[in-house]
Structure formats: C-alpha cells, structure tokens
Amino acid sequence: MASESKFSLSESRPKKDRIFLFDVDGTLTIARKEIDEDMKKFMEDLRSKAYVGVVGGSDLSKQLEQLGDNCVNEFDYFFTQNGLVSFKKGQPLASTSIVDFLGEEKLQKLINFILKYLSGIELPCKRGTFIEFRTGMLNVSPIGRGCSRAERNAFEEYDKKAKVRSTMVKVLQKEFADYKLTYSVGGQISFDVFPEGWDKTYCLPFLEKDGYKEIHFFGDKTYPGGNDYEIYTDSRTVGHSVKSPADTRKEVTKVLTSK
C-alpha cells in the first residue's frame, strides 16, 4: 500500500453516525475504467463533509487500477470482494476464503462443472480467463476476462438478448443446490459465485460495529440478481440506485442538501 494518504480523513466531519458507501463499476467509474477527474474532485470534497467507504466485488488489484494506487488510504473503509478483504483507514481487517467454506473437493467439482459447461456453448467470440479465483468468490466470465474493450461491450449487448449469464446461473443453482451458494450478475461480462450471505451486505457488520446507523449505499446493479441488490434493499441501508458516475454525484448532493 502507499504509505501516506493524499487526502485528509478529518475526524471533525458532521454526523458521525452517517456514512456514504459506494459501489465501483457504474457508480464511481464507467465499468472497468479509471475514475475520472470530476469524480476524483467530488470525492475529495465529500471526504471533508462525510465518512466515506467503497464496496466492490473485484479484488484489490482491480480496484487499485480503477481508483488509484493509494485509494485504500483515501477512504475511511475500503471493502474488496464484497468485504471479504477489507481495510479501515488503510489498515487491513480480518479476511476469509471460499476455500475454507467449501473445501477443496467441492470447489474443484464446481470449477470442473463450470469449465465443462463453458466448453459446450458457442458465443460470437471467446478469449481467456473464464474463471478468476478470488479470496471469497469465483468470478465466471463466459467470454473470458481477456477480451478487449470492444469485445466486452459487444458481449454485454449480446447477453441482453441471449441471456448467457442468467441461463448459466440457473443451471448452477440446480446442479449445486446443496452448496449454499449465491450467484450474482455484475459488470458487463461475468457473474460472481460466493457463499450465501457473502454478498455486499457482508461489509455492513463492520460499519455497525463502529456505530454507523445511517448508511447510504449508492450502486447501479440494484435490480434482482444484480450484485448491488442485496445491500440496496437491506433494512440497514438507505439505498440509492444510480445510472452513471454523474448520476451518483447528483444523488449524493441531494442527500447532503436535504434537511
């Protein structure tokens, strides 16, 4: 981690029991792209007015690519992989693993089934890295995470009609019904597989423990099956559904200016 925070995380911010919690893709950034200057400046200003956190499904390396090398130190809370790998003011919190939950035998059975299923479907194109192992989940991409930006965009449009991901999720839900897993479609090209309860709500106990009672969550995949749905609808949060980084700024401003 970068050793020094660029921005001051002031302890004099008002409403010490309120925090603004953000998804990454589609909320702070365009999907898989770097945060732009407008959002950087907006977040810098917000950090002087409120407690701020990030919760994303991706692993730390991808969030560093999108939000900057020092981003872990620039937020009060930084939750990667839905909170399974977490940081508070730059310091790591306890983490856990899907291997510990499933065990190696079950995990390999799941991985082998996924690979066999993907080998039997045809798409407009396929590239590489169809399964990405993360600490708390598997990320499954039918097209492969090695695709180009143009191929990523094309698959997203294709999937809206062909329902490749949602169809595959239904197959896995039936085949591994006794594994107690959740399947969550997110981003443009993939879906996540993780133990029940390990969705983005996994991060909420960390905030509750520290006394936050007003948790505003901002995300774009807030529909049923989207990877923001569970935390967006959770009784512990005030959910805000957004369509883009610009929309996020508008929604945050509404909260800040409301009485």
Image (cartoon, rainbow, N blue to C red):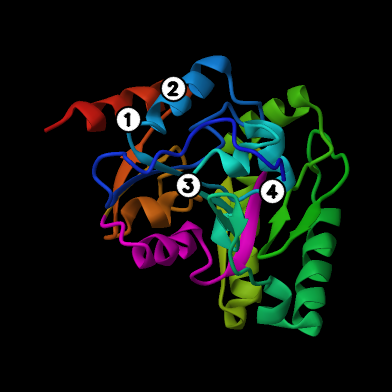
Label drawn at residue 252:
1
Mark 2 and mark 3: Cα distance apart in space: 16 Å
User: Circle 4 sits on which residue?
Assistant: 60
User: Circle 3 sits on which residue?
Assistant: 76
Mark 1 and mark 2: Cα distance apart in space: 10 Å
Q: Quadrant of residue 251?
A: top left
Residue at 79%, 60% in the rendered image: 117
Q: Which residues are magenta?
A: 190-213
Q: For numbered disc 4, what is the local secondary structure? A: helix
Can you give x and y, in whole percent of width and height, for residue 193 in the image? 63, 62
Amino acid carrying mark 1 in the image:
Val
Mark 4 and mark 3: Cα distance apart in space: 16 Å
Can you give x and y, in whole percent of width and height, for residue 255 in the image? 24, 33
If you read the primary sequence from the N terminus, does the residue marked by circle 4 or circle 3 appear first?
Answer: 4
113 relative to 187 in the view: left or right: right
Mark 4 and mark 2: Cα distance apart in space: 22 Å
Can you give x and y, in whole percent of width and height, for residue 109 in the image? 79, 77
Amino acid carrying mark 4 in the image:
Leu
Amino acid carrying mark 3 in the image:
Asp
User: Circle 2 sits on which residue?
Assistant: 42
Q: Are marks 1 and 2 in contact (CB under 8 Å)?
A: yes
Q: Is residue 116 above or below residue 181?
A: above
**Mark 2 Cα shell of 10 Å, populated few (<14), some (14-19), many (≥20):** few
**Whether residue 91 is visible:** yes
Q: Quadrant of residue 216?
A: top left
Query: Camera-side residue: 210 or 40?
Result: 210
Q: Is residue 134 above or below residue 72?
A: below
Query: Camera-side residue: 255 or 128?
Result: 255
